[in-house]
């Protein structure tokens, strides 16, 4: 896949997304939103996919849970991968399923040896079932968990070493986590080897009602701080597929495309430097 | 250890929480409430935003999602509504919810080519003809005027509506990509019910005619076919 910038696809933007003339534009969707048997939603995605590369971003595999991946869910993901032949497939370092109940969230785990082993086994199961590499996204942090045995960056690198997966680095998650837990976002990014980065996410965040925590809300423009971190990260790791993620307060398509053009410019600058 | 951590964490965010835990709790809850809002838009109109959100949060606590596909979340909502004490004053609400659930099922059902009358040309063995309902076909018979209420609210009406209180049938089909809402007559419901149970077209027609002798079964059948209620026979057969 050409390391260009893409946009999260929303049904509200269907006509404009189809008509967008931008070269190398690609789209990402949450895989779970398309895990249905048929109908207009899948037809819409097929129309988008006809002209553009697609990235399938899973939010429900619960890779960091104690249970094996749900076979039905894995089969549904494989069905989408087989049908839409996405350029990228990604999931989260999180859990969202427990004792038959699903949580519509990405819940955290302590980075212990036990969790590392469990995650590596689950990632390998998914990769084996799909017959391809997946990317694992770094989570947002709100809560300082006790019992970590690994730093986050070394944990991610070790997961990649054990499973052959690569990483989806969400720069906004790094910025939000750094603010909430009090670490250095730039130093965090510095510890990620360039060769492991398969995709980057950029999104906006908001301040919690209590005014202390940043929320990874995806409902605002990308912050200046995140743009700066991204600029520095790309200068080091080189051009990498980059997604503009927006879920709430959905702006007109052209506003998302303006953010996409800004990311594309940063990628292009990096390409020029590399040449 | 991991399982224990997950169970402790789940319990912590199920309880009213402060600080960081509140963020997880809110996200989990709003994910469920938003999914119910998306799947029950007319119930939202009937109850109003504030009441719907409170009702949905209660439902999400009692019947949380079992699958991560939230487009299909809320299957238990209509029956759960039926059991709520406040619904006694709003008896049509659970039926409207049933209609919205059938709509969602029709919307996301598998694609299939609908049967057309021309495909049956020359056929005479109606007793031996078994037609598969189209995968998106959904129908019901409800003891309230919920279908009229649903149809009126679908496009967002303002003000109070008056309805005569009587039972109504409904049929959803999806011959192309759009779900078609259809008012279903009692004989039509009996006919489709028989087909769903595995009766042949001939058997369902005779049973329907016996129950409703005034019905023109031929017209009823072509109406249902033209609505897209049946799938075209597969090419293999």
Image (cartoon, coloured by chain):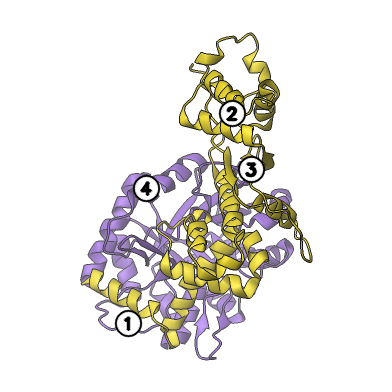
Alpha-carbon distance for marks 4 and 1? 31 Å
Q: Secondary structure at mark 4?
A: helix
Seen as rendered, the residue at the extreme right is B158
The residue where tag 4 is placed is: A72
Q: Is residue A192 above or below residue A62?
A: below
Q: Is residue A56 visible?
A: no
**Crowding at mark 4 (Cα within 10 Å: few <14, some 14-19, many 20+):** few
**First of labels 3, 2 by sequence position:** 3
Residue under the point 54% across and 91% down? A211
Alpha-carbon distance for marks 3 and 4? 32 Å
State the residue in front, A17 or B138.
B138
Tell me which corner region of the image, top left, top right, bottom left or bottom right, holds residue B7: bottom left
The residue where tag 2 is placed is: B211
Q: Is residue A202 above or below residue A16?
A: below
State the residue in front, A33 or A4.
A33
Q: Is residue B94 visible?
A: yes
Residue under the point 53% across and 17% down? B129
Q: Secondary structure at mark 2?
A: helix
Chain B: its colour in the image is: yellow
- State which chain disc 2 sits on: B
Q: Position of residue A218 (x, y in %)?
A: 57, 71
């Amino acid at each position: 896949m050409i390391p260009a910038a893409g946009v999260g696809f929303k049904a509200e933007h269907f006509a404009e997304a189809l008509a967008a003339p931008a070269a190398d534009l690609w789209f990402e969707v949450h895989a779970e939103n398309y895990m249905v048997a048929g109908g207009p939603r899948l037809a819409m995605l097929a129309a988008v996919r006809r002209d553009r590369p697609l990235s399938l971003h899973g939010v429900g595999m619960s890779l960091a849970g104690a249970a094996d991946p749900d076979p039905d869910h894995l089969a549904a993901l494989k069905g989408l991968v087989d049908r839409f032949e996405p350029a990228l497939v990604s999931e989260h370092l999180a859990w969202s399923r427990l004792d038959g109940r699903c949580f519509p969230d990405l819940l955290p785990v302590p980075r212990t040896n036990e969790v590392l082993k469990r995650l590596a086994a689950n990632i390998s199961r998914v990769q084996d079932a799909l017959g391809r590499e997946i990317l694992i996204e770094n989570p947002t942090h709100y809560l300082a968990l006790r019992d970590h045995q690994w730093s986050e960056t070394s944990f991610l690198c070790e997961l990649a070493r054990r499973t052959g997966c690569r990483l989806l680095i969400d720069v906004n998650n790094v910025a939000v986590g750094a603010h909430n837990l009090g670490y250095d976002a730039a130093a965090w990014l510095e510890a990620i080897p360039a060769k492991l980065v398969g995709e980057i996410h950029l999104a906006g965040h908001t301040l919690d009602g209590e005014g202390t925590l940043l929320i990874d809300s995806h409902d605002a423009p990308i912050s200046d701080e995140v743009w700066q971190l991204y600029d520095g990260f790309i200068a080091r790791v080189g051009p990498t597929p980059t997604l503009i993620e927006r879920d709430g307060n959905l702006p007109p398509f052209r506003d998302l495309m303006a953010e996409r053009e800004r990311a594309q410019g940063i990628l292009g600058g990096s390409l020029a430097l590399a040449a | 250890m991991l399982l224990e951590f997950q169970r402790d964490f789940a319990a912590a965010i199920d309880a009213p929480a402060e600080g960081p835990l509140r963020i997880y709790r809110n996200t989990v809850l709003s994910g469920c409430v938003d999914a119910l809002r998306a799947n029950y838009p007319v119930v939202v109109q009937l109850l109003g935003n504030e009441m719907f959100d409170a009702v949905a949060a209660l439902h999400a606590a009692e019947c949380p999602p079992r699958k991560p596909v939230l487009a299909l979340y809320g299957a238990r909502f209509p029956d759960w509504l039926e059991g709520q004490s406040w619904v006694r004053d709003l008896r049509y609400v659970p039926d409207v919810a049933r209609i919205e659930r059938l709509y969602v099922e029709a919307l996301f059902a598998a694609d299939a080519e609908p049967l057309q009358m021309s495909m049956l040309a020359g056929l005479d063995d109606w007793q031996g003809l078994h037609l598969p309902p189209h995968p998106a076909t959904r129908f019901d018979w409800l003891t309230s005027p919920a279908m009229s209420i649903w149809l009126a609210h679908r496009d967002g009406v303002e003000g109070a509506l008056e309805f005569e209180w009587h039972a109504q049938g409904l049929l959803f089909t999806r011959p192309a990509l759009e779900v078609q809402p259809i008012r279903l007559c009692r004989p039509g419901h009996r006919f489709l019910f028989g087909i769903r149970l595995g009766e042949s077209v001939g058997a369902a027609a005779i049973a329907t005619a016996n129950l409703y002798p005034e019905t023109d079964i031929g017209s009823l059948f072509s109406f249902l076919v033209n609505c897209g209620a049946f799938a075209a026979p597969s090419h293999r057969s």
